[in-house]
Amino acid sequence: MSTLEVDRPVPTRRSRPWGLIVAGVVALAAAGLAGLAALNGDVTYALGGLETAGRGGVSVWDVFVARPVAYRLMLGSLDLTGSLDMAFTHRLIRAEADLVIVAVAVLLHFGLRRHLAGPVAAGIAAATGATLLIAPPWHFLEPDWMAALAAVVAVGAGLAPRRHWLGALLGGLAAVLVVAVKLATAPIALIALIAIAVLSRRRAVWVAVATGVLAVVWYATTKHFLPWEWIWLKDQADLVADSPIHHGLRLRDFRELAHGLGDATVLSPVIAVAPAAFAALVHRLPTTRQRLLGAAVAVVASGLSVASAYGQAEFYMYHYAIVPVLAAAVWGAAFALCPGARLPLVVSTVALAVLSFVALRQPAGRRLAHYELVENAYLLAAVGTAVIVWTVSTRSVPWPVGSVALTLALVPPVLLGAPYSFSTYDYKISAATPNPSGYAAVSERIGRDTPVLYLSFGAVNHAMGNPTSCRYPSPQWLQRGTKIASVREYRSYADNLACLTQDSQARYLIVQTDWFKLDKAPADVKELLDARFDCSPAARLPRTGNLVVCPAR
């Protein structure tokens, strides 16, 4: 028996075929729109490191791209083209990821079918899968987004097998993966366990035990065979000086968390309807005790969904990647199980989708100046819809109408020209199609297979594609060392510095002048570079944009 007794939905009318066809066409069109945008700069940073170091003979196990090995393996498995045409590479990676998402949604459906009626399971799985598929460009393929994907796998795999031990093993493996792609996303694994517990306490206990055991195995294995993973992790954590792990709880961090959540809600308005969806699900429970338990589950799950963003304390939009996924899953459950709440859910979802489209099309300066007004409007809408759903029961709405409404709420941030965030970091960067840059021309000039040493952000590596034998293809530690003196004491810095002497194959030095400030580098870095490369004006290749190319001596 399910914990909150959500396994007996009220019967609904069968949707007419034309309605399902329209809903399917709208969903496919939205997925197509999402696929037009180039992969974001963080993803191309990681791709560039994996591609160019891989061509230089560095294993995926050993390369540093500021991401754990689990993430590197997942992203690398999607990059089948290496460093060929950028637009084709992005399209292929997107298509491969989309196929994975569809498979994950199907797995979730199979898992839910063991505890819910078919239409309800399908509705929740479709809503969850659509949100992963039509994700904001700055979410898509980020570690936090991959953690959300793995959490959905954990729920589906934990619930689907007939044998509890098999569900525990598969669900536990996926839950560990949630943590392995990025330690900060550990709260997302707890959300997956809560979701399983809502439907089966016994399975949740099995999966939780398996997760604990497998997490210890994962830690011991990586600690023994990949010790640098944990050195990098510690040094990465030390870089984030504002994290609560360094200073504890601060009111300022909670304000920033709320601001970031408000921005995430403008991008993904389904978040604003999540309180109403939770309210509808709790209200349908038959006893006061169950309602209190349901409300507690909603509060805890909601808190965990923003815990990762709070812990990282940078409040980038992709740190909230789990929030719209959780919101959509709850939205799908409420729509399926609570016919009397469907009309307010649909109306508010569509209205907020229109508001998001208009808000995201405003100039950057106007968005920044009026973000509080806009975010408060979404907050009022969230509260108002929740009150209506709790107090009023309205007429039902057909399934295709709900599908179209939810899809519309996912579209605003994926349209070309939409900003990566409404008013926080990267609010001036917009989704755009992948375009060839002048960096590819630099590669053609020096030879596509010519080994180089990069002093550049990894996205430049991705655009050029030239091999490097340094396992720090984008030398983050040397770059941070030009600005933060304490970084020069890190073990990662010393290891990165060794590339300047050990990488004897490089025929050119590639310097991205707006990312790596050579004039601010420590004296030993300047001396080592000067001994190997000639960056005099006479020797440099003609400058291309922000790149300086220096030949080896």
Image (cartoon, rainbow, N blue to C red):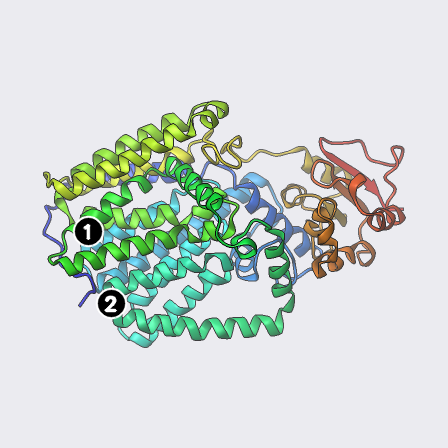
Disc 1 marks a residue whose amino acid type is: Leu
Disc 2 marks a residue whose amino acid type is: Ser
Identify the residue at image location x=33%, y=55%: 301
Image x and y of residue 369, in percent: 46, 25
* Local SS, label 1: helix
- Residue in the foreground of this view, choosing between 311 and 451: 311
Q: Is residue 15 left or right of residue 458?
A: left
Q: Which mark is residue 200?
A: 2
Please say if 181 is above or below 92: below
- Residue in the foreground of this view, choosing between 342 and 48: 342
Image x and y of residue 97, in percent: 45, 50
Q: Is residue 82 left or right of residue 135?
A: right
Q: Is residue 226 left or right of residue 433?
A: right
Q: CA distance from mark 1 to mark 2?
A: 17 Å
- The residue at which mark 1 appears reads as 281
Marks 1 and 2, the one that precedes in the sequence: 2
